[in-house]
Amino acid sequence: MSNINPMPREEGFDHTLSLMREGYMYILNRRKSFNSDIFETRLLGQKAICMGGKEAAEVFYDTEKFKRKNAAPNRVVQTLFGKNGVQALDGQAHKHRKEMFMSIMSSEALEKLIHITKRQWEQAVEKWEQLDEVIFYEEAKEIMCRTACEWAGVPVPEDKIIRLTKDLGAMFESPAEIGPAHWLGRNARNRVESWIEGLIEEVRNRNLNPPENTALHKFAWHRDLEGNLLNKKIAAVEVINILRPIVAIAIYINFIALAVHHYPEERKKLESRDEKYAEMFVQEVRRFYPFFPFVAALVKKDFTWKGYKFEEGTLTLLDLYGTNHDPELWENPEVFNPERFAKWEENPFSFIPQGGGDYFMGHRCAGEWITIEVMKVSLDYLANRMEYEIPEKDLSYKMNSMPSIPQSKIVIKNVKRKM
């Protein structure tokens, strides 16, 4: 036992309130104060290990050491993830379900997604030209909801699109909320799951025939490792696991608008429509601005890492935001600088805005490619294809709001298409 090191420990009975107060900065603040990439604390009444950085990410995504089942708090399951979705699976069950998701990520499917996104942007700009002003975040969510549903093969009556946009948004806006705002997310999930379950039944009864390569079709007919069709409720959860994350890209699109506004020198560079620079800009938005604060897992079995003991069943949080702002990994991490990605050597554990590890075998977000392509289309419109004004308002964003968006949600006025 002589080679076991005492882990830095935050004193006190429980620090859940500190986590809520500090939000994205909670783990990073303590990593700095302890001068350690790992520390022990107590959250939601239980022992928890928090860690960040490239090496921490590497061990966190080792499926021999950590598991995801039952790791997420119930309030997150009831709003963000849904029950028995791919995020909560391990081993062969996770691999098999993940393959279902990756099967709709072909180059042809991504090209179709790009086409749909462009068309939805065109229609949105045409609508905005007739309005005095628009609340950009709400409009971006609607663009993404329309895009997601068409791409996933989910038919939505026009008079239902606003309600569905709000419901899908509530799922990722409410997990960290308390009281009515949180229950709004739970009710939204129940409502959308019930509706999607009905669509799954219609597909299986041959009364609805979505295109074969869409999520609704593939997930409705997907069979588990035993050869059985997925329970219709689980299939519905997984369809929502396509729709909800695409709508959540509205958060990133909101930050694209903010970055284009705050860094006019970068906007000038974008006018060249250099595809490589546009992707660098998008990647820097993903690195710089807050999206997911952290991800959770449970220790699968006792092990020792860097002299620290990890005991079976211990809740462990990996600091996503802090890893993307780690000065050991990023030069001047608090400076917005797309040029850093010109020299960046891609690594699945150092740049983890949507999780790390391997796409196929691990728990890295299957929709990361979708996010990047949709963001590139959105950036082109915001920087090159439309003119607009952003009135002087509070454009700050709170680091203890999860997700974080500018307080005014950005208002744009006098929208005109560029000729």
Image (cartoon, grey):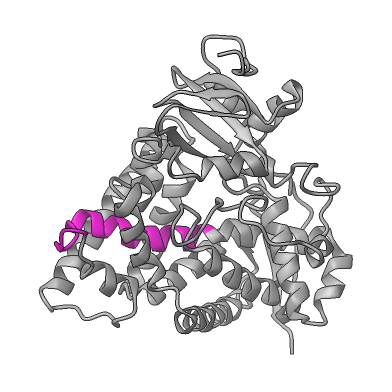
Whether 269 is among the magenta residues is: no
**Height in image: 129 above or below 97?**
below
From the viewer's side, name the closer residue of 412 and 377: 377
Q: Is residue 88 left or right of residue 197?
A: right
- Residue 225 in picture, x, y percent from top left: 21, 59
- Residue drawn where x is 75% and y is 42% of the image: 326
Q: Is residue 320 left or right of residue 269?
A: left
From the viewer's side, name the closer residue of 318 and 81: 318
**Height in image: 271 above or below 374?**
below
Whether 240 is among the magenta residues is: yes
Q: Is residue 361 left or right of residue 13?
A: left
What segment carries the magenta color? 225-248
From the viewer's side, name the closer residue of 120 and 335: 335
- Residue drawn where x is 43% and y is 70% of the image: 148
Residue lying at the far bottom in this picture: please name it. 419
Residue lying at the far right in this picture: please name it. 265
Residue lying at the far top in this picture: please name it. 12
Quadrant location, the C terminus: bottom right
- Residue 125 in picture, x, y percent from top left: 61, 78
**Height in image: 25 above or below 194?**
above
Q: Overall secondary structure of the magenta stretch?
A: helix
Residue 313 appears in the figure: yes
- Residue 24 in picture, x, y percent from top left: 63, 37
- Residue 39 in picture, x, y percent from top left: 62, 23
